[in-house]
Amino acid sequence: KESEPVVVGQLEGIEEVATVEDALSTFQNILSVYFTHLLTAPTASTTTHTSTTTHTSAVRIVELYEAAKLSQGEVWLEADSDMGTLLSVKLPFLGFVCTIPPKVGTGIHRSQWQWKHYAHLGLFEQAKNAARSQYHQQRALNNASQLVLTLESVFGAGYLERDIETPPRFPLSTAKLALKQFVKEYTKVVGANPFLQGLIQVFTQQQRTPDRVLAWVISNTVFTESGGPEFMTKALRLMHTLQFQ
């Protein structure tokens, strides 16, 4: 049950702030914008000023929310900017009230806000965790789809077929150069370490048993996580050059 609000020094023109239910609904909408942007990652050619502003304000609101968690609901907002003005309009819909407004002509350009619904932090954390969980699930699906498309692009549409008799052939010098360039680029990238360590083990084991065909079992996440935006394609191209099937 929501307790009666205690409002100190409300911002002029704002007589009341959102209820817990309305604030939670607004927060969920902001989280949707925040995580959707992370999934879509629009390019400069497709990003509009409106979408950029909406996402930026969502990021700032999430940052203010995280700050409020650590300060018993108290946050400070830079008021002398377009984003500060925009946030000062949005914050009441999340249950924030302005306790110390900026004073024009005094050099004080920050305003202090108090989160009225700090006592209901658990509800907002549940909403954030649910949105984050959904984001990670969708991101995993997107990464898996991208991996399949990249495999088809590098190895061809029949990449799952075992064609032992006619494997792709590359000159040894080409394979050595590709390996050297790849190691040089990714040797200091922590996320690429599992792939590089696995590749070393494959080479070592192949030297010990040259009369055997080895199977290297690799988790999809080795290609889709932590190596960087181009790691998946470059790692698969290297494997293709080294005649993996």
Image (cartoon, helix red, strand yellow):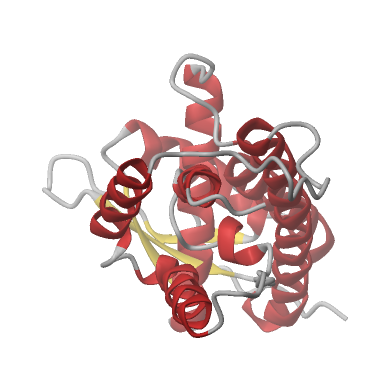
Residue 97, quarter of picture: bottom right
- Describe residue 155's horizontal placement relative to residue 22 as left or right: left
Residue 35 vs 204, above or below: the answer is above
Quarter of the figure with the N terminus: bottom right
Residue at the farthest front position: 211
Q: Is residue 8 visible?
A: no
Labels in figure, total: 0
Residue depicted at 61% across the width and 47% down the height = 34
Image position, residue 60 (x, y; %): 45, 51
Residue in the image at 52% along x and 42% along y: 233
Query: Which of the two residues, 114 or 168, is positioned nearer the viewer here?
Result: 168
Q: Is residue 199 left or right of residue 123?
A: left
Residue 244, given in percent of the width and then of the height, sits at 60, 54
| Image: 66 above or below 22 | below
Figure quadrant of residue 4: bottom right
| Residue drawn where x is 78% and y is 51% of the image | 141
Q: Is residue 115 left or right of residue 129?
A: left
Residue drawn at (73%, 81%) of the image: 122
Look at the picture and state if 129 lies above or below 54: below
Q: Residue furthest right?
A: 1
Looking at the picture, how far across and down is residue 154, in whole percent? 61, 36
Residue 197 quadrant: bottom left
Question: Of 129 and 208, which appears nearest the observer?
Answer: 208
